[in-house]
Image (cartoon, grey):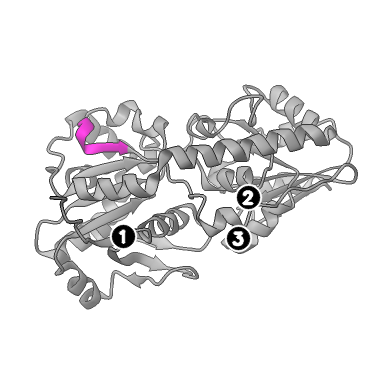
C-alpha cells in the first residue's frame, strides 16, 4: 500500500526582507516551490523593510509564531544569507525539538559570513545552492548525509521566467549598454579598467546596487560621462533596468561571498550575453564561448565585451544559448521535488553533532563582531 504523503507546516525564517535583495529573492523562490505541494507555511523575519510579494510577520509577533510552532509536522527552513540570531530566538520559542533545514545562499567560506557553530549544530540538513559552496573545504567536516546541493533556480512554471520569454534587444546601432547589478562589496577595484578598455565608441555602463552618498564607485563613475550609477532597486525596477542592457558585464572579487547569484540568473533568462570574471560559483551557470564568456584577466574581459558590443549576431547567439542552458539546468535540477524530499528527510536525520575546534577558532577570529551582537542582541 502506498504511503500517505506527510503534510508539513514549514516556518521560513531569515534576517530581513527587502524587495530586490538576494536573500529575500531566495525566500520568494522557496515559497514558489512550496506552492507545488499542499503544505502550509508561515514566513518570519527579524526586520521587514518591504514585503510586496508575500505576507510576512516579524519575530516580535510571538503569539502567531508560537501557534504555528505548536502544529504537527512543523519544521524550520532557515534561509541564511548573513549573521543573525533569529534561529536561536525561534528555537527558544518552540520549546520542543524541531527539524531545521538551513538553506545557505552565500559562500560558507567568506570570512565575515561563516556559518556559526550554533547554526550548524542546530541543523538537521544544510542545503547549498551551488556546487562550489557544497564542496568548500571549510565545511568538509559536515557529514554528507547532513548536507545537500540543490540549485535555487526558478522553474519554467515560475511567472518570473515567463516574463522574460520574449526579451531581447535587437540593437544594431546606437549606444551599447553594458550593465551589472550587485552590491558595493561585490565591486572589484579594477572593474572600471575593464569598461575603459572596451573598444566600442558608443558605450554606456549602468551599475546597479550602489548606495547613495560618498563611496569609491560613485567617485570613479563621476569621472566618466558614460557611466550611470543606481542604488539597489526593487525587483520590478531591477527587472526593467536589466531589460535595457545589451551585455551583462559581471566582474566580482576572487574572494567574494557570491553564490550562483540571482542578478546573473535574471540577465541570462533575458538572453543577455554575459562576460564574467571572479569567484568560482557563478561560473557554474556558464559554458565558456558557448553560453557566455569567462575571463581570466582585465584584458580578456574587455576583449570579449568588445566583440559582443560590435556583433549583434554574437550577442543574440550567446544570449539564446545562455537562456537555453539555464532552463535545462532548472529542469534537470527539479528543485521543487528535491526540496520536498529534503524536508521529509529532515524529520529522520539527527542534528549535526560536531564542530571542530579549528573551525570555532576561525569563526571567532573572523566573526567576533557578530558574537558581540549576539551577546548584546544588537542587530539592525
**Is the residue marked by circle 3 packed among few (<14), some (14-19), or many (20+) residues within 10 Å?**
some
Q: Nearer the observer, disc 1 or disc 2? A: 1
Quadrant housing the C terminus: bottom left
Q: What label does residue 189 carry, if any? A: none
First reached walking from the N terminus: tag 2 or tag 3: 2
Does residue 107 appear left or right of residue 186 in this picture? left
Residue 322 sits in quarter: top right
For mark 3, give the secondary structure.
loop
Report, in whole angstroms, how far the alpha carbon at label 1 lies from the one at label 2: 32 Å
Spot occupied by residue 151 in the image (x, y as percentages of width and height): 42, 41
Residue hosting label 1: 13
At x 28% / y 54%, what residue is drawn? 77
Q: Which residues are magenta?
A: 143-148
First reached walking from the N terminus: tag 1 or tag 2: 1
Residue 332 sits in quarter: top left
**Is the residue marked by circle 2 packed among few (<14), some (14-19), or many (20+) residues within 10 Å?**
few
Residue furthest front as drawn: 1
Residue hosting label 2: 215
First reached walking from the N terminus: tag 1 or tag 3: 1
Does residue 70 appear left or right of residue 149 in this picture? left
Q: Does residue 242 appear in the picture of this structure?
A: yes
Q: What label does residue 233 carry, if any? A: 3
**Is the residue marked by circle 1 packed among few (<14), some (14-19), or many (20+) residues within 10 Å?**
many
Spot occupied by residue 367 in the image (x, y as percentages of width and height): 32, 43
For mark 1, give the secondary structure.
strand
Q: Is residue 186 above or below residue 8?
A: above
Report, in whole angstroms, how far the alpha carbon at label 2 lies from the one at label 3: 18 Å
Amino acid at each position: 500500500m502506498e504511503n500517505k504523503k506527510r503534510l508539513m507546516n514549514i516556518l521560513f525564517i531569515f534576517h530581513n526582507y527587502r524587495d530586490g535583495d538576494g536573500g529575500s529573492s531566495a525566500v520568494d523562490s522557496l515559497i514558489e516551490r512550496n506552492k507545488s505541494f499542499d503544505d502550509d507555511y508561515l514566513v518570519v523575519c527579524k526586520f521587514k523593510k518591504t514585503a510586496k510579494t508575500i505576507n510576512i510577520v516579524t519575530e516580535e509577533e510571538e503569539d502567531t509564531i508560537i501557534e504555528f510552532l505548536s502544529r504537527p509536522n512543523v519544521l524550520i527552513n532557515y534561509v541564511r544569507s548573513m549573521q543573525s540570531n533569529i534561529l536561536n530566538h525561534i528555537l527558544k520559542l518552540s520549546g520542543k525539538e524541531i527539524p531545521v533545514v538551513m538553506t545557505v545562499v552565500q559562500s560558507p567560506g567568506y570570512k565575515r559570513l561563516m556559518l556559526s557553530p550554533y547554526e550548524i549544530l542546530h541543523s538537521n540538513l544544510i542545503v547549498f545552492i551551488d556546487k562550489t559552496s557544497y564542496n568548500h573545504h571549510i565545511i568538509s567536516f559536515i557529514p554528507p548525509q547532513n548536507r545537500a546541493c540543490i540549485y535555487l533556480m526558478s522553474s519554467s512554471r515560475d511567472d518570473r521566467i515567463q516574463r522574460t520569454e520574449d526579451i531581447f534587444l535587437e540593437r544594431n546601432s546606437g549606444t551599447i549598454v553594458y550593465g551589472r547589478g550587485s552590491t558595493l562589496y561585490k565591486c572589484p577595484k579594477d572593474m572600471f579598467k575593464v569598461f575603459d578598455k572596451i573598444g566600442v565608441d558608443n558605450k554606456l555602463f549602468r551599475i546597479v546596487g550602489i548606495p547613495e552618498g560618498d563611496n569609491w564607485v560613485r567617485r570613479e563613475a563621476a569621472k566618466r560621462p558614460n557611466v550611470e550609477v543606481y542604488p539597489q532597486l526593487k525587483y520590478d525596477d531591477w527587472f526593467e533596468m536589466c531589460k535595457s542592457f545589451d551585455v551583462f558585464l559581471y566582474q566580482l572579487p576572487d574572494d567574494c561571498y557570491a553564490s550562483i547569484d540571482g542578478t546573473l540568473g535574471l540577465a541570462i533568462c533575458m538572453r543577455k550575453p554575459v562576460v564574467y570574471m571572479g569567484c568560482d560559483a557563478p561560473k557554474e551557470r556558464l559554458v565558456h564561448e558557448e553560453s557566455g564568456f569567462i575571463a581570466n584577466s582585465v584584458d580578456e574581459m574587455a576583449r570579449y565585451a568588445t566583440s559582443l558590443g560590435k556583433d549583434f549576431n554574437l550577442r543574440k547567439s550567446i544570449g539564446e544559448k545562455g537562456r537555453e542552458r539555464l532552463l535545462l539546468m532548472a529542469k534537470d535540477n527539479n528543485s521543487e521535488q528535491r526540496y520536498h524530499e529534503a524536508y521529509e528527510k529532515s524529520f529522520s536525520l539527527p542534528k549535526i553533532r560536531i564542530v571542530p575546534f579549528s573551525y570555532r577558532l576561525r569563526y571567532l577570529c573572523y566573526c567576533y563582531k557578530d558574537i558581540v551582537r549576539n551577546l548584546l542582541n544588537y542587530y539592525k
